Amino acid sequence: MKKFLIGSVAAVIGLTVYGFDHYQSEKKPVKIVDAYLNEVADFSDDRILVGAAQNVFVGEVIKEVGSKRLDGTPETQYSVKVHKNLKGKLKGEVIVNQFGGYDKDSEGNSVLILYNEDEMLKEGRQYMFATRYLESEDWHTAITNQGTVELKNAEEENTSVGEIMSALKSPIVPEAMKNKEKYNNRNNDDKSKLDKE
Amino acid sequence: MRKTVLALSVVAATLILPSNVDAHFLGHSSVDGKEIRWGTAKGTTGWTTARNHSISVWNTMGTIKIAGDTTSTVEDLSFKDVDRSDVTWSGSHSPQTGADVISYNDYYFYDFTSSQRKHTALHEMGHALGLDHHGLAGNVLRSGFYSYEVLGSHDKSDYRTLWGY
């Protein structure tokens, strides 16, 4: 009986210490590392945002479905249910890709890389999305920051929809997106020739 | 007594009140021991003119040496070309395990002018040096789409504040 009691007390103490330690480690916030993208236009102007986007829609993030590094940098994919199209005609659930995601630092600790301080999408939340499509991955990449605007309530949604609809009356295609002649007709040796111009 | 109070007030104001133009830093960089050693561990770029221009211009500041990687150094930075039509950026600086990466996006670079490519390269190298965006005209770290080929006064002052002379 005595041994049983001692063993029980020891087990309770051990579990308490383990639980506290686990709780403390779970509480530690992941370090955020800021990375930067040089945008080709000022997308704080909604007319330029909708001019650059191929799709603009209200959608709800269902869940995170993947993480890829097409070019070595973390990109996170989410399944998003389309509620309302403002530009384009998306249906059902689509994959929205967002630059950013988890990586390891030089010491092996998890870090969260955010591009242009754009917060990662959250499951269950509704957003106004402005995206561009990548056929090879069948995903829609969100324009950083202005292309992932959270809509917390009906009022915010109505306001955002109104602003986008107004912008869509006079969209502005960014200069960098207008002329794609050299890109569309590129050959392997074109880059070295262009580089020397 | 009055002079002492006045002097202390001036000192306090200097410490508390913001300066007209704040410095802009990332809090991290690709700099390792006053150098950035660049190489090809994580990719290469065909836009060598823009890359080399960014290296030579930032090297004129003198404190941080940007040079090619050797067998006796650790690579801090790679350059890589990407081809992404689904994004709205022409260049990026990404902190990574091992060497950080500066990427140039072919989707825009092909039709950019030489000045626009050089500006993007200068801008991204500024991030590699730990400098952050700001909105001051005439500077390569001004966020947005510009064609500056030389450093502006705020680029230089931020660099000096961060790295000294």
Image (cartoon, coloured by chain):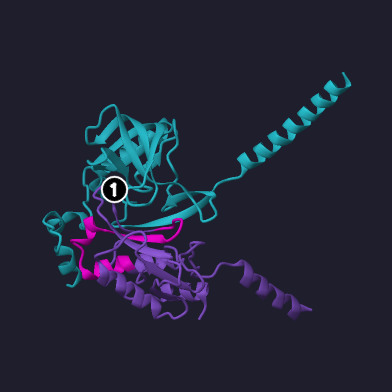
Examine the image and state in which quarter residue B118 appears.
Answer: bottom left
The residue under the point 74% across, 80% down is: B3
- Residue B160 spot, x, y in % from top left: 49, 76
* Quadrant that contains the N terminus of chain A: top right
Report the amino acid beneath label 1.
Leu
Is A122 placed left or right of B84 in the picture?
right
User: Tell me, what hue is chain B?
Assistant: purple
- Residue A2 spot, x, y in % from top left: 88, 21
User: Tell me, what hue is chain A?
Assistant: cyan
Residue nearest the viewer, comparing A181 with A174? A181
Judge whether residue A45 can be spotted in this image. Answer: yes
Residue nearest the viewer, comparing A25 with B146? A25
Is A2 placed left or right of A11 in the picture?
right
Which portion, as a residue range, is magenta?
A: B94-121
* Quadrant that contains the C terminus of chain A: bottom left
- Residue B49 spot, x, y in % from top left: 25, 72
Examine the image and state in which quarter residue A194 appears.
Answer: bottom left
The vertical placement of A35 against A133, above or below, is: below
Is A86 placed left or right of A159 in the picture?
left
